[in-house]
Every structure is written in C-alpha cells, then in structure tokens.
Image (spheres, coloured by chain):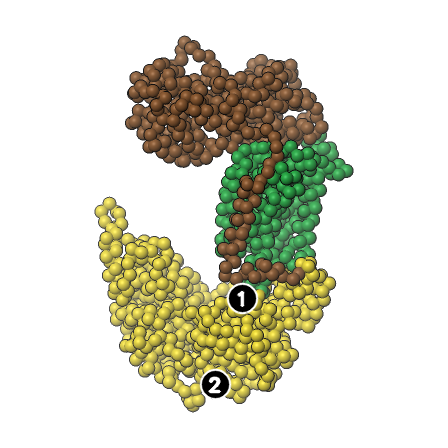
Amino acid sequence: MTDIGLGRSRVDRDRLLRLLQDYGVHLGVAVLLLVNIAFTPHFLSAENFRTQAVQVAPVLIVALGMALAIGSEGVDLSVGSVMALSTSLLSLYLGYGMWIALIVAVLGGVAVGVANGALVAFIGVQPIVATLALMVAGRGLALVLLPQLKDVRDPTMASLGSGDVLGVPYLVLIAAALALLVAFVVRRTTFGRQLLAIGDSRPAAKLAGLPVRRVLILVYVCSGALAAIAGVLATARLTASDPTSLGTLMELSAITAVVVGGTPLSGGRVRVGGTVAGAVLIQLLTATLIKHDLPPSWTQIAQAVVIILAVYAARERGRR
Amino acid sequence: MKPNTFLRRTSGRTAPGTLLAVGLAATLALTASGCAKSEDGDSGSGDKSAAEGDAGQVVSSPGAGDRKTCVIGDYGAEKLDLKSATVGFSQSEKEANPFRIAETASIKAEADRRGVRLLTANAQSQFSKQISDVQDLIAKGADLLVIAPLNSDGWEPVLRQAKAKHIPIVTIDREINAAPCKDYVSFIGSDFVEQGRRAADRMIAATGGKGEVAILLGAAGNNVTTDRTKGFEERIKEKAPDLKVVFKQTGEFAREKGQQVTEQLIQSKPGIDGIYAENDEMGLGAVGALKGAGKKAGDIKIVTIDGTRNAVRGIVDGWIDGVVESNPRFGPLAFKTLDTFTKGGKVDQDIVIEDSAYTKDNAESDLGKAY
Amino acid sequence: MPALPVRSAEVLSVAGLSKTFPGVRALDGVDFTARAGEVHALIGENGAGKSTLIKVLTGVYRPDPPTAAGTGVLTYDGSEVEFATPLEAQHAGISTIYQEVNLVPLMSVARNLFLGREPRGRLGLIDFRRMHREADTALRGLGMRVDVRRPLRELGVGAQQMVALARAVSVEARVVIMDEPTSSLEPREVATLFGVIRMLRERGIAVIYVSHRLDELYEVCDTVTVLRDGKAVHTGPIAALDQLRLVSLMLGREIGDVREEGLTKFSGGHDAEAEPVLRAAELTVRHLLRSVSLTVRPGEVVGLGGLLGSGRSETAKAIAGALPPDSGRVVVAGVPVRTGSTPAAIRAGVSLLPEDRKAEGIVPGLSVRENIALAALPGLSRFGLVDEARVDRVVDTFMKRLHIKASGPHQKVGELSGGNQQKVLLARWLAMNPKVLLLDEPTRGIDVGAKAEVQKLIDELAGDGLGVLLISSDMEELIEGSDRVVVLKDGAVVEELGGDAVTEDRLLRAIAAAPAAPTHSPSAAPSDSPDARDAPGDDQAPGDDHD
C-alpha cells in the first residue's frame, strides 16, 4: 500500500528478486554444470553423473521431508539422528530378513515423527526446540542400540545400494519416485493443501476449521519416515551401519537444499522441484571443490554464501 | 477423505500426553533388544580380540640414553603395593569405535590379570564430565590414576587435587600440558608423526616410489590428522620425490565420507596410483568406492592407519596394501609402569610405544591380533 | 468547546496536534490538556485516535510538523518539549501503564519496582535490604501485601498491574497514563485501583485514563475528552454529561436526528416465527463475557450492538468454537454443539467471518481458488485426493455469484482489495452450506461499492433461510440490516430490541444504560460508588425523553 510514487526501479527489483528466489537455484545448477564441463577433467561422463546422483539421493530424500516441515512453518532438526536410528534398527533386525528390518527401521522414523508432532501440535513446543530434543535423544538411542559401526552382509541390502535398472541406480530411482510422490501429495491431496494453509496463516487455518494438529503430526511423521528411508539407503550403499557418523549435519544440508530451492522459511509454500535442484546444487558445489582439490573449508564457506544469497532473496522479496 | 477417526477422537484433552507417549513407547518398543535379531557374523566385536590378543604394547626403544626418567621420591608420592591398591581409569570418549573399545578392554583385562581393583568412568566426549569423573575417582579412593585425556589443556584443578593426595597419574594415548614427574608421572602413547612416516614407507614400497597419491585427511583441527599428514608428506618428499601428493580432502575419519570423496577422486583423477587414508574407516570407504567403480583389488594401492580387524582383513582380500597399527592396548604397559614406579623403580617420563604393521606377509597370521 | 475555568496548573498539553500516517490522518488538530490533580478520561471508538494520541504524548510517535505558529506543539510543565524516545518522556515524569504489563516476570517484585534505579549501597552494589523494605512500603501504600522477594509472575494479573502502577507512582511521575487498566482486573482489584487513582489526584498528579467502561469514568474521572475520527469533539467536566450524551458523542450520532432511510442496501424486515437455528445460552468467559444468551432464527439477521470492548466479537468467537467458554451452551438446529472446537462448530453449520480479516480470515499466500475451497476441501476430496474438477466448479460458481473481482482463480488473495477478500471468505463459508453465519464487521475497511454489495448479499443469504448474526460499528448498517438487535455492555446482554424498537435512539439509550449487573461488586468497594450514583444519566430509563 506504500508503493505509491516509488517508481519503476522498485518494481523491477521486486521482479528480479522474485525470479532469483524462484529460479536462481536452477540457474546456479546450470552455471555449475557449465563450469565443470569446461574446467573439470572427465566431468562429462555417465559414471560421473551417476556418482553425483547416487551421492545426492539420501540428502534429497531427507530434504523432501524437511520441505514439508518448513512449508508448515516448522523445521525438523531430528532428521540426521533419525537416519542414525534407522541404521541401528536395520542392523539389529536384519536377522529376520531385509524387508522386516526395513519396515522396523522406517517405523522408528515414524515413531520419532509422532513424538515430534505431538510436542509441536499438542504441547505447543516450538518446532526448533521439539525436534532439537529428538535430535539429541535419537542419536543417543541409536548409539545405545548399536554402539559402533557394524558391517551389513545381507546381499539384498548390498544390491539395493549398488544395483541399477538400465544403468539407473536404485537409489536414484527411489529418490526420484519419492520426489514425485511428495510433489503429488503437496499439489493434489487435502493434506497438502491444508499443510500450506497452516504454514501460511495458522490462525486463519484454525478458524477455517482445519484439523491443524492432525496435519502437523502427519508432517513430522512424513519427515521422520523419509529420513529413515534415507538412512536405510545410505546403509545399503555403505554396506555398514554407522550410527556414530551417519547423518551428522544432515539437517543443515537438508535445510540448505530446501531454502536454496526457494521454499520460504516463513511457510505456506513447498517447492519440490526447487528442493531437488537445491540438493543437486549443493552436491555439485561440493563435488566441484573436491575434484579441484580445494581446501575442505572452502566447501563450507561456499555453502554458507549460497545460503545467505538464498535467504537474502527470500527476505528482500518478503519485505515488499 | 473420510477423516481419520482415531486422530479425530484424540483431539480431546488427553490426547497430547497419549500421543507423545505412543511415539516414545513405539520408539522404545522397536528398540527392545529382546526381540532384535541382528545378522550373524564376527565383525565388529572387539572385546574378544582385546582380551586374547597379544600381550600388549612394546616400548619402541627402551633404554635409550638421553631419556628423562622419574622415580617416586621426585614425584612426592609414597611406595605402595599395586596388588592392594585401587586404580582409577578415566576414558575420554564413548566406547563407540574399535580403538576405544580395545583400549578400555585392555585396561580392564590387565587389572583382572593382576588382581588389582579397578574403578572406571567414561566422559562421553565431554571434557567437563571427564574432570568431574576424575574427581569422583579420587573421592572414591583411587590410589593411582590412568587417564585417557580428551583434551591436553585444562587439567590444573584435577592435578592439584591429585597432588595433594600424592596420587601418581599415567596418561595414555594423549599428552596433557603439564610437567611430567611433577604434575603427572608418565605419558604412554603413539608417535602419530612416526605412524605417518611408516605409512609413507609402505606407500613408497607399494607404488615403487613413482606416480600420484591422494590423502584422505582425518577430521580438521585434530592433532592426529595434523601429525599423520606431516609424517607422511615429509617422508614422501625426502625418500620418493617422484611420488606426488595430488589430492588432499577430508573424509572426517568416517567410512561414508571416505567413500564419497574417493568416488569423486577416481572420476576426476582416474590415473591415481595410491590412496593414503589416515584411519582404517576411511580406507574401507575408499575400498567401497573402488569396488563400486568396477576397479579390481590392487589397481589402486591403499595404505591406512589403525589396525582394526576389518582393515587387516582388507589386506588378506588384496584391496589394502598396508595397515600401520596404532596400538590401543595400553593395559599391560600402563600397569607395568605403575608397578615399577610404586615399587620405587625408575620409569620413563615419555614412553613411546612400538606400533606394529600389517602387510601381505603377516596379515593372515596376525588377523587375530587386530582389534 | 466551552472555555474551562482554570482549576489547576496545566502539566501536559497539546494544541492543534496532527499525526499523519501514509494514507491515514490519525489525529487532526487535537487540543488536549492534562492538569495537576485531575483525572482526565480519554474515550473514543476504534480508530478514533486514542492510542495515537497517547503514543505522541509518550514519545513513541513524533507529531506532524506545525502548520501554524503554536500548533502541533507539546507543552510540558510550561515549556515546549519534544520527546525523541519513550525513555525521555519517562525520565521527564510521564509514566504509562499499558494493558499488558511490561515488566520482567522472572525477577522479584522488588526488582521490578526498582528496575533501572535500584538503591545502591557502598561499592555500587544493590542494597537489597533497603530495596525490599522500600518496595514493601510502596506496595502497602497501595493496599497490597505481598512478599516482594517472590518472582513477579507468581502474582495474578491484577496484582502485577498494581506493581506496574506502584512503579509508575514511585518514579516521581507527574503524569500517569493508564490504558484500559481494568480490563483484566477482578472487581476487588478495580476498587483498589480506584483508591490509588484518587490518591494520585490528591498528590497533584495528572492522570489520563483510557477506558471503554463508561460507568468507571463516572466513578473516578473529573474531565472527559471524546475523540472521533482523529478529532477532539468534546472536552469538559464529566459530571456535565450523561452517558447517553457521551455515547452519542463517541458514535457521532445525535438523538432525534432525522434518520435517512436507504443509506444501506438492506431491505430489512425478515419476519421470523420459526424455531431458532442458533441458541446460545449463558456463555461465560472470564473477564470477557458474562452469561450471554441469544437466539437467531432461520432467515433472521440479529445484530449485536455495543461499544468497543463490550464483548461482541468474543460472543461470536465463543459461538464459533474459537474461544472456549468457561460455561454455557450452544445449540444449532436443536443439536447441542461441543464448545471450544472450531471443527465441531463448523460441522454443526456455524461459520464465522472474523473481525481481523487479514490475520484470521484469509490465507494471503494462497490463491483465490484455494482460499474458497479451504474449509470445504474434505468434502471436495475422495480418499484424500482433491477432486480438482469439483473444486473448479464450486470456485467458479461462487466467484460469479459473489462477483469476486480477481485476475483469475489463481491470483493470490493477499493481492485483492479488502472487499474482494471479504467476498472470498464469504464464498469459503457458503461452500460449506452453513446454517448460521456470524459476521464480525463484514464491511469494515472496504470501499463503498463493495460495502453495498456485501450488504445486499447478507440480505439475500438471510432471505435464503440462513440465520445471520451481524456485528457492526456502523450504526446504519446495524439498524437497517438487523431484524433484532441484542445490545451488549461490559460482556453482558443489557437489552434486546426487536421490531419497531430497532432505532438509533433506542440503541444509543441501551448502550448508555446501566449494565445488567454491576462491574464491581458493591461489597468490595462500599465507599467508592457515590461518584457513580451522582452521575446523571446513570439512572436514565431507556424510554425517557431526554432532549
């Protein structure tokens, strides 16, 4: 309402920021691809793309759940610990066969999600605090269950981690399928619509009679289940359960992917395509720095710069 | 969608507690180890090997002339009989990796063997907890202390307390910044720089001293990382100028990270001849990456440090060329030092242990020694 | 404005004060004077400019630059001043007590009292013994006996407010401003507060008292200034005005004015003999509602009258499940509804168009389409999947029927005009086929054309057999739109006007009438009521010919 007399430049800048927030991540991916094709030896090969896709798959799966949590104006810090918990459970139950172990591992993630959701929806704890509690507790529990790294010898697990269909690794297929599923849920289901409404304006959603608590619990259950699936896949790829280090700092990577992908932290919006691109962008960034043997601390700095840019674009736009 | 009646009904007053309880209970129920059933296999469990392995560590070069020594009179304590004494042991990190597991098991086994009463505590990687752990041990009546310090600094208050009670202290695997034979008796540990040098020797032998090698660094800002890198690079430069270090990236001492970094490495530098991993886990991650990329055992030479059983088995399988041991079995040497010292004998202030190594020649026969 | 005899020294005054915000003139040439030893009431309806005036006086806002000599200037203690910050005003001796207590809940009562000016002993350390002693004395002086060492949060809201008051008084204030101080107090605490205000008056402190509770004003105030639309429309001794006159000044309506018909788009006169579709009985919410009962029949528009703070919005929210009542029942079409649950109320057919459209109504980031379909979504879905074709049909129907102007169903609601936002919300509820519509200020802040459209729509909906409960500060809208008007005052129903009695005169008189039950129990404050009894108009019967 204060736009009167502010002139064209403001409007143009607004549009630019909007474009930057919505499509900046795709631009970033394109630029990184071009830079690598030009300067990184052996970049343009099927094996290389396969490697990047396989490495990004677990991060992406976690980020999909994170996007739902952030879309509901929350956040889920417990995802890394859920990965650790799921790898511990998987290892403990593998004696019954892969499928049972897999189900138990995912149920572990669901249980953490229910606890997160209950804290947020019923007790009214801030998502950041509630999930922080489960982040600490989850990793602790994972280490009680399995105090140290343990090899996984199950051949089905190993083939889940390294097998492929027509050259596309299972991990990549599963991540792609989950991305499509989450996009579908956000766009086409009542749950998805209600989630966005709650994230955008909780009071309005409440007065409109939406089942706010049920939706919030479901959001954290989804996030927990997706993180657990990511934990299972990472375990299959490593052919080992490593609850000490699996998923450490995963919450940060996931949040970065989501935010860089244009999903605002203020909720009300979930950009699945952007999240995929955000995860790929970070993967490419890390790969570029490693391949050129730049000091590891640069990776962190580069990631920080990308996050700041993304948050800046979102913030400036939000100011209008 | 017909609304889920279960959730709807729970939107009443009692729901929050119930739901939270359901979530937590489910988590716990899943984890009740009573119904868990893991894969069969002998991997990972270090307790057995620690107890039945070799007799412990050997001092690297005993009796060398210029070593500083310590006797009980200098330290200001009184002689006592180790058999009737109580020893307190403070472990720094959770026993969540083979090294720590073997270290604690070795101390316990040696105490058992000698019939000494042992009190133990674990600081769970929190330094403040370790300080209070040691204070507790003193309060519980420990006559002697063995400490695996988490930090080198910050020990003054505890040392002063121990001093007041004339309690001899031996630190293992990491030094503390204080005066030996005054604030504590001796330090028993590995020489990480030397471990790096020996890894370089193995790498030079495996590659013939020519070609390009990569280093998988440990966690940044860790003195083990710094020392193992320094020793390796110095020795390569000095002995094999034709062997170039062309890649140095951190694998953070973790298998998954080691695997991911190696995957990037072998695509951008397919001609790499060797990989030096600063711990076994990263080395095993590298093996995983090579397998995934369709390489064959021996295509790329891998040298690692630590001596865990999985890595030594890697030598037997032909994927790993050499493992330099970092011996965690401090029990025998620590107790021997305390025994000598409390009887009034002379002990070295700085005891560097001899780490053995595993190669194709001894891997199979010595597999049982690995932890 | 009559010239006032000079009773006592002017402490704080403004002349010709204006304050403009982008697009809004919040204050327009206001004259206001606070005198030593005088309790000055400041009243006005929503948006009249009360809070803006207070914020200018306390340095939160800067007034507009003077347009002519001597205008727009703040005079304090005989000289012109400019407060750059609230802190400056505070240091100068102007203390403000807000509705929400702004103290530190975890600190002790004594610490709060002396926050920032703790008595220091040697070495500059806080002298706790002295502080506790002085705090105790100060609070005893206000008739409070508490352990000053306890954390503040352990006290009740009323007691906390007394601490805030004690703090204000003990900082050597010369002006004390109280903004709705009694809104969360128990009757006994109100009596204590009034005692303190009288004490302040005796000490020669100027008190500025803001309240919606008119009866209170007669109890403690000497002078009253009525603000309306940013102007001071009246200043004078409160004893010279009866409540009816006060209300008509606030609302800008004169008794006996010839009312022009047809100012609104209501056709009026839905007759209703049917069984009530909504029956609310004895709804009670602590501090907000006292046993409010009302009925709405199908096809009937029932207005809720009353001043700001009388409990109109709270009544609507309690019926809609958004405000859990302490007691009371809601029955819709003969079926009791679980109170305190919005989904339950919605399922029963009750829909609320909330007063704060932007914060509680629309979901600004979502499209027109999603906003319309929001509440009805479960019904428009199968197995949790949204049936997009059905949603499109519903959205299309209502966008056409309500003439919603948007670039299309996919435009964000946040980008629409207020009137269209309101229509989107109406569409959201109509898509649910409600039995009862609760409309809280449905036409506030929307332009004239849209207002007429919304009014016409309400009329039509009632014609279709819906029960409508209408809350409006717009007198014409309320009177012409309603078949009956239930008048609220201080959270209780004071009168119900039906048929020919729905006139402005009757409405004003009802609002000005004494409350159904006293706000403060007489037993708690036996000596405090004479002021109130002396006030003319207090015993004014609704039918009395006044002018």
Q: Residues under labels 2 and 1: Cα distance?
A: 36 Å
Tell me where residue C117 appears, x and y as whole percent: 29, 54
Residue pointed to by mark 1: C341
Residue located farthest toward the bottom when viewing the structure as drawn: C545
Residue at the spot 35% in from the left edge and 14% down from the top edge: B345
Tell me where residue A203 appears, x and y as whole percent: 54, 62
Q: Secondary structure at mark 1?
A: loop
Give the chain ID for the brown colour: B
Residue at the spot 28% in from the left edge and 53% down from the top edge: C118
Residue at the spot 46% in from the left edge and 22% down from the top edge: B330
- Please tell me which residue lies in front, C97 or C172: C97
Category of crowding for the residue at label 2, using alpha-carbon neighbours closer than 10 angstroms: few (below 14), some (14–19), many (at least 20)? some
Give the chain ID for the green colour: A
Residue located farthest toward the top when viewing the structure as drawn: B65
Question: Do the residues marked 2 and 1 share a common chain?
Answer: yes
Residue C506 marker: 2
Tell me where residue A208 appears, x and y as whole percent: 58, 65
Asked if residue C485 shows in the view, the reply is yes
Viewed as shown, does residue C375 lie left or right of C535? Answer: right
Asked if residue C442 shows in the view, the reply is no
Give the chain ID for the yellow colour: C
Above or below, C43 relative to A180: below
